[in-house]
Every structure is written in C-alpha cells, then in structure tokens.
Amino acid sequence: MNKNSKVKSENVFKFIGRAFKEGDILTKLSFFIMGLSNLVRGQIIKGLIFLSMELGFIFYMVMAGVAGLSGLQNLGTKTQEQVVLSEPPYVKIVPGDNSMLMLLYGVIALFLLAAFFIAWKANVKAAFEAQKIKEKGGKLPSFIDDIKAHFDAKLHKSLLFFPMTGVLLFTVLPLVFMILIAFTNFDNAHQPPGNLFTWVGLANFKTVLFSGQTISKTFWPVFGWTIVWAIFATGLNYIFGMLLAMLINRKGVKFKGLWRTIFVLSIAVPQFVSLLIMKNMLADKGPINGMLESAGLISSYIPFLTQTMWARVTVLIVNLWIGVPYTMLITTGVLMNIPEDIYESAKIDGASPVAMFVKITLPYVLFVTGPYLIQQFIGNINNFNVIFLLSGGGPSSLDYYQAGKTDLLVTWLYKLTVNRKDYSFAATIGILVFVLSAVVSLIAYRRTSAYKSEEDFQ
C-alpha cells in the first residue's frame, strides 16, 4: 500500500490525532484558531476563508444555534395565550413557543454543526499539509493554484459540491425533520402554537403496530393489501409485458413498429389523465356500466370501484394496462440482443419452445431486468397515483382509521396527514414503509443473477 492510499484509508479521528501529535505549534494552534497555520505561512486567502468560517459559526451559535439545540430537549414549554382586555381590541394574543419551529431550528443547528466539523477537519488537513510542504522546503500552492486544482485534479469535487448541497438542504434535512416527527405526539390535538407537542419515544410505533387500537387494526390489513398489491402489480406487468414483447418480436409478425407504437400510446398520455378518465368510465353510473346494461349483459351496475373485491381487481387491471408497455419496451431490447445461434443449437438438440423459453430466454431477460423488477416492486409499494386517482383508496370502511379497502400504506399516510393532521402517525408509517422497501431491495438484489453471476453473461 503506497502513502497516498494509506492517507485515503486512514480513519478521520486517527488522522486528527496524528496531525496533532506530529504537528508543530502553528498546526496545533489551528485546531483552535482555524486558518492560522495557512495565514502565517503565506496562504492568506485560504487562511482568511477558514477563519471567517469559524467566526461565522461562533456568531450563529451565540445568536441562534445554542437556542436551537436547547429547544430540542423539550420542544417548548410556553403555549400561546389569549388575554382579555378592557379596551379594544379586547383580546390580545400572547405568543408562546412553537414546537414545530423549535424542532426545525434544532435540526438546522445539528446540520450546521456537522458542516462545521467537516470545515474544521479540512482546516486541520490544510494546516498539516502546509507544514509538511514547508518542512520539505517546497513552495506552498497559492490561492490561484488551488482554484486551478479544483478545475483539474479536483474537478469531480467541484462539480459535486452544488448538487450535494442541494440534496442535503432539500432532501436529507426535510427527511431528518420528518423522521424526528415520528418520535413526537404531533397530531390533531397538538397543533402549535396553540398547543405544543413533545417527545414520546417509540410510543407511536407501539400504537401503530401492537396497541390493538383502531389505528393498529387498520395498519395490518393495509400492510397486507400493500404487499399483495405490489406482488400482483409487479408480477402481472412483468409477465404480460414479456409475453407481449415475445409475441411482437416473433418471426412472421408484420408491422412490428406499429404494434409497439399502439401499446406505447398509454405511456404518451399523462398517467393522471388516463386514471381520471378510467375512474369516470368505471363509475357505477358510468359509460361502461351503461353500455353493458344497454346490451343486456347485466341487470344492475357492476361495482367496479365501490365493492372491495371488485375495486381491488379493477385497480390491478388498470395498472396492468398502464404498466405493461414499459416492460414490453425493456424486454424488447433484451430479446433483440439474444444471439440467434443459441436458439438454433437448442432446436438441433430437440429443445421444445417451452424449454428454450425457460433455459434461454427467461435467464437472459431476468439477468438484465432483475434490478428493474426490484425497482418496480418497490415503486408499486409506493404507487400513490394509481390508487389515489382511480379509487381514492375506497371503498371506505368504518373498521379502518382514515383508510379504505384499496388504500396502500402510502395513500393512508397521505390521508392521515391531510385529513386528520396526524403527522406523528404518518411519519411513523413512512419510516415503516422505508424499512420495508430497503430490506426487500437489499435481499432481492443480492439474490439476482445480475449480482451473483455477472461473468456468466459476458
């Protein structure tokens, strides 16, 4: 192992300890006064940047950071009050704590604390490197040299800086905030600033999973239907999409491009438009029931979306119509790249069409589309559009808490948030959905041929 690889693989805390142990007085002082080593050794701009970071962080912590971190302890103690006055306006609102803002400010403070640690570690590294260069009698790079390096050897870091910052600010930070909501009692009875919410630990998970209350009796049936939905929606789309691709790609089938275009039209139309049209067509008094009744095929309307079993079958069929073209297109590309001589050799050996499909076609298709199949399964667990826009989660049930018979966990989560403002329960269910998706993804991917037998298909 060379020196550079050793530095890269070194633990952060080991590096900091080594830098402090081997560092001279300027490097050691840089642990407390950021940029000092660079300033004294002539890297003025770099040193001033590090020093300004430290001063800005200290100013933030004094003005808001300490208050934000301390607010995380209890999320507020003083509620908003109304005071009756003897003179107009007769009622005065006395502001109190806002638990939601205190939680948000606390999360921001934690993120800035982590960002400061990264900047502080970069300062230690810069100080230590400057010391080593000086000890060897070398010339320290100027600020212009550092800028040039960030557009040359360190270009990848420069290009990733702004996207990573955006991901942290607009994705990771809100996710951490919503995850923490799951450990509070932020619901319709605790709406700040009128009422405060506080930490409750794992109580929400216990209530949702094991309490025996209505919400727990809702979670398990909805969870079960979510798994059933994901299995059938993914499996049917995959099987029928593959069969459709094989049918179109058969020798002797003319106008292959035309057939593909016809099936792809359902992708070209925005999904929400298709689903809303289908919802109206499948209504109890909709066009489909009207035509069937006029033709004498039925005596009363078919409850496509208003009876539990009918509604569940209907959403699966409509999802099949929408999802099959995607699988067809992906499978078509795989089928067109399977060498023909493999099939010819199998025919010479007397293999039947079924045997060739099982032994040749299916392994190739699964190898390429295995990760896609897993992604589709996870996507169907979180398939909000089809359920919400088509059935609205219905039919409703008095046995369920804010959920219907076709609601998935993700649509139920939405209803808890929008209809009932039970943010803590919704965040709890969101975490459970994430855990389910992550576990299924990791286990399934490690079992795919794309992971285990890549060299077999080179």
Image (cartoon, rainbow, N blue to C red):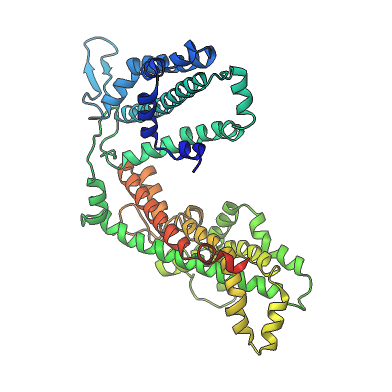
The image shows residue 357, relative to residue 97, as above or below, that is: below
Q: Position of residue 377 (x, y in %)?
A: 48, 61
Q: Position of residue 294 (x, y in %)?
A: 58, 73
Figure label count: 0
Q: Residue at x 52, y 22 (%)?
A: 136
User: Is residue 289 visible from the viewing direction of this image?
Assistant: no
The image shows residue 434, relative to residue 337, as above or below, that is: above
Q: Residue at x 56, y 78 (%)?
A: 296
Q: Position of residue 456 (x, y in %)?
A: 58, 69
The image shows residue 347, relative to residue 335, as above or below, that is: below
Report whether 179 appears left or right of 330: left
Q: Quadrant of the C terminus?
A: bottom right
Q: Position of residue 49 (x, y in %)?
A: 49, 16
Residue placed most toward the observer, 425 or 24: 24
Residue placed most toward the observer, 439 or 95: 439
Report whether 348 appears left or right of 440: right
Q: Residue at x 52, y 35 (%)?
A: 164
Residue farthest to the bottom?
350
Residue placed most toward the observer, 283 or 122: 122
Report whether 343 appears left or right of 394: right
Residue farthest to the front?
136
User: Is residue 370 visible from the viewing direction of this image?
Assistant: yes
Residue placed most toward the observer, 83 or 23: 23
Q: Residue at x 29, y 13 (%)?
A: 89
